[in-house]
Amino acid sequence: MAATTGASVPLQYKTLTMARPDKGIEKELDVALGKPKYYIETSGKKEGERYSWFPSSGDSMTDNTFRSIPGGSLVLGRWLPIKTIQDIPLHQPIVVVFNDNGQQYCILKTVCKIKMDTADREAMLSLRSYNPAPRCDDFWLPFCCLKFIFIVERVRRPDDSEFVPEQEEVIRKNADK
């Protein structure tokens, strides 16, 4: 386990610990998000919370229902500081920023399951798309790769319609195989 000095925000579950100094996490978030390309006037944000608009691409979050988030949409994400794996909401659209082999990725998914660490595996998140196509199957993301999570609080589709996504389980046939 890593030891830190000063105030820190630990990311942990059992033996899994990732601690970052409070100021360090803010700087790391700024680096991960980069400089905003444009400003969108947005009402209804909670004071003291950190928000970012994220563009979506592709059709993995499209299932021809009202909850669909088609490519070309913008999603307003509220940063969720994670202290433990239990802080991660299930069945809620989220933007996940993670590292894989030194490369940073940013994806829009829902968390459908959390696997706690066991003797042979570390804690993992099962990420799910709305699209039921086989190419959009669930995949497991190790908790240690997670950098940031943003809860999607608003979706602005390419046709300028907007909606607030609800927490809702996405049911898949044979998803547990």
Image: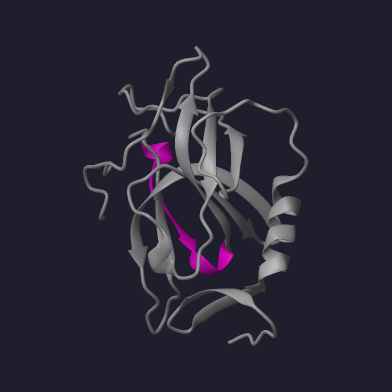
* Residue sitting nearer the eye, 90 or 23: 23
- Here the colouring is one colour
Please indicate, yes or no, whether residue 117 appears anywhere in the rendered image. yes
Q: Residue furthest top?
A: 159
Q: Residue at x 47, y 84 (%)?
A: 15
The x and y percentages for residue 145 are 57, 64
Above or below, 79 relative to 142: above
* Quadrant including the N terminus: bottom right
* Quadrant including the C terminus: bottom left
- In the picture, measured across the screen, residue 67 lies left or right of residue 105, that is left
The x and y percentages for residue 168 are 27, 41
- In the picture, measured across the screen, residue 109 lies left or right of residue 28, that is left
* Residue sitting nearer the eye, 106 or 160: 160
Q: Is residue 144 magenta?
A: yes
- Number of marks in picture: 0
- In the picture, measured across the screen, residue 119 lies left or right of residue 23, that is left
The x and y percentages for residue 10 are 56, 75
Above or below, 42 relative to 138: above
**Image quarter for residue 120?**
bottom left
Q: Residue at x 34, y 28 (%)?
A: 67
Range of magenta residues = 134-145
Q: Residue at x 42, y 39 (%)?
A: 136
Q: Residue furthest front?
A: 47
The x and y percentages for residue 166 are 32, 37
Q: Residue at x 62, y 25 (%)?
A: 41
Above or below, 87 relative to 61: below
Q: Is residue 166 magenta?
A: no
Above or below, 148 relative to 69: below
Please indicate, yes or no, whether residue 59 appears anywhere in the rendered image. no
